[in-house]
Image (cartoon, grey):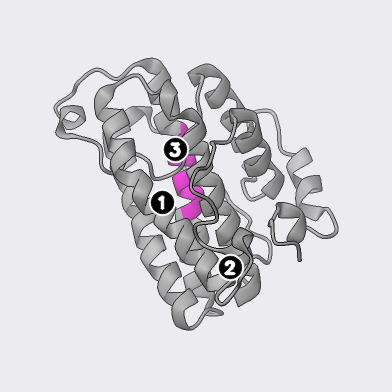
Amino acid sequence: MSETFTWGDVDKDGALQEAAAEVDGDTRAGFLRKAAIGGGAVIAGGAFAGALPAIARGQAIPASDIAILNFALTLEYLEAEFYAKAVADGKLTGETLRFARVVANHELTHVNFLKRVLGARAVAKPTFDFKDTTASMAKFQATADVLEFTGVHAYLGQVANIKAKPVLVGAGRILPVEARHSAWIRDIRFSGGTNNVTTPAPAAFEDGFTMQRVLQIVQSTGFIVS
């Protein structure tokens, strides 16, 4: 396996890409495209669980931020479901199991918070199919690595598009947690590695992903089926 992990490392026969290609129209994948285009931004799942009290007091949130919040909620649904299923399937042990339990709790907390903030404007939970990605320790670790890595870089690439300060500050409070998730799973996967690419913190600076790149990664998994 290459040291720079991609979905191709999981999807050897192209089954996930083929499944994703069939998801369109009014499906959840279609929503992801529409939400991102309409809102003008994409942000990582989990970015808003630390939002400030001003939101709870009913401060107006711009329509574009509502789109971002709903996009985040959809990603949080995906992550929460993935980790919950991995724990329930019983294939994980040791530090990997501890990671899955902790992160499952974080992502579920993010889901519940976002639903409270959005109220009637919250999108419905999609239907997921995680294929066999929770069937073994190695497959779970590889998939979790990509989910967390992509989420952090989606935030970095799009945070400047958030308009409401409380939402922005909330995102900033959660970013370190998301980054720690990513570092934690990479440390589990590559423990003892000496190559800089496979360390939890491979560089002093990192750049964000574009909206198009994030959408391609999410859709290519085929996890969101309706």
Residues in magenta?
Answer: 71-79
- Please, is residue 110 above or below residue 137 in the view? above
Between disc 3 and disc 2, whose residue precedes?
A: 3
Between disc 1 and disc 2, whose residue precedes?
A: 2
| Residue 77 among those drawn in magenta | yes
- Residue for point 59% across, 68% down: 140
Residue marked by disc 1:
178
Name the image quarter holding residue 36.
Answer: top right
SS type, badge 3: helix
Q: How many residues crowd mark 3 within 10 Å: few (<14), some (14–19), many (20+)? A: many
* Count of number-bearing discs: 3
Residue type beneath disc 1: Glu
Residue 132 percent across, percent down from the top left: 68, 67
Q: Specify the quadrant that holds the N terminus.
A: bottom right
Q: Is residue 168 visible?
A: yes
Residue placed most toward the observer, 166 or 86: 166
Residue marked by disc 3:
72
- CA gap between label 1 and label 2 equals 16 Å
Residue marked by disc 2:
141
Residue placed most toward the observer, 200 or 71: 200
- CA gap between label 3 and label 1 equals 13 Å
Residue 74 percent across, percent down from the top left: 48, 40
- Depth check, mark 3 against mark 2: the one in front is 2
Residue type beneath disc 2: Gln
Numbered mark located on residue 167 in the image? none
